[in-house]
Amino acid sequence: MNLRRLRHFDTLYRLGSYARAADELGLTQSALTRSIQKLEEELGATLFDRTTHYVRPTSDADRLIRSARDVIAASANLEQEARGLDQPSSGTVAVGSGPYPLQPLLTDAIARFAELHPGVRVTVTGGPSQQLLETLIDRRLDLVVCNRAKFAASGHADEVLCIPLPTEPLILVCALDHPLARGGGDSADFPWALPRPAPGSNLPRTLRARFAAGQFPDYELDSTAACLDMARSGRAITVVPLRLAMRSGLAMIALPSSEVTRDAIHLLRNRSRSALVAAFVTVLREVAQAETIPSNSAASADPAR
């Protein structure tokens, strides 16, 4: 089987257009068509339904694409190893990130990785954890960093290797002139801006019914930066990891000691990983360990109300 044809299959599957796929591959559309037809003959399967209006993957293509991507990735890894990439110098690491580890853990790790491997490109995709999981399973991401409870609750948990990272206290933050900062009111009395809470989150009792009814948080934002902007404006309160809270310039209110991050690195099981990905995982774990803040460091914040 020709590896080049597998790459053509992957590109056409991803882009859903012969014109765009041919342009990205530097081929004519007729050459790409012949390549796909030859691959279909080799596999004994029809990979795409074709009309004058669209190109749509068949069920056979959906079933084979992950294996094809594994072969492509394994080939790339072999080429890297053959070139002696003990210190990776080029290539791409594709990372998915939940909102809490994105800042400052991943941004700090990327800065450190760039110092060690300046020629390597790092891409970061955010979004809901379930969506990131699907993208990881489809081999479009090399790793995902997010709350491990969300992956444990998914239907793909048995396909994913989970490497826990050190925990970090979570802190409630609000504007400096917010009533909570002045010791007035209860946190349940004010609008919240949050990413979607993980399964099993220990929400205050007054908020659990709202969460169960799909009415909490008031502003569901998959970006801690956006949540912090809402808090600065005084329109909402939010919860972020302690390191980010300390950089925010907002009033900090301590939560119970049980409220901590539970992030982990998620990798596909039984899939070969490149020297690039292995190097990035090593740096990420080292940064997470070096920047660990003990839970008792949150004691300097005002107690939660």
Image (cartoon, rainbow, N blue to C red):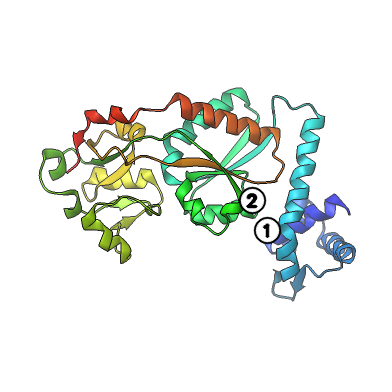
Place of residue 212 in the rendered image (x, y in percent of width and height, measured from the top left): 32, 64
Residue drawn at (42%, 37%) of the image: 103
Residue drawn at (53%, 30%) of the image: 285
Place of residue 293 in the rendered image (x, y in percent of width and height, measured from the top left): 37, 28
Place of residue 166 in the rendered image (x, y in percent of width and height, measured from the top left): 45, 33
Q: Is residue 18 above or below residue 1?
A: below
- The residue at which mark 2 appears reads as 140
Place of residue 158 in the rendered image (x, y in percent of width and height, measured from the top left): 60, 53
Check residue 120 in the rendering and tell me which mark sits there, or answer none.
none
Residue drawn at (57%, 23%) of the image: 115
Check residue 14 in the rendering and tell me which mark sits there, or answer none.
1
The front one of 37 and 17 is: 37
Please report contact status of discs 1 and 2: CB closer than 8 Å, yes or no: yes
Q: Is residue 267 left or right of residue 191?
A: right
Q: Is residue 122 left or right of residue 17?
A: left
Specify few, some or many for label 1: CA neighbours under 10 Å numbering under 14, 14-19, or 20 or more. few
Q: Is residue 196 left or right of residue 5?
A: left
Disc with the residue nearer the chain's start (1 vs 2): 1
**Element type at mark 1:** helix
The front one of 87 and 170 is: 170
Which quadrant holds residue 16?
bottom right
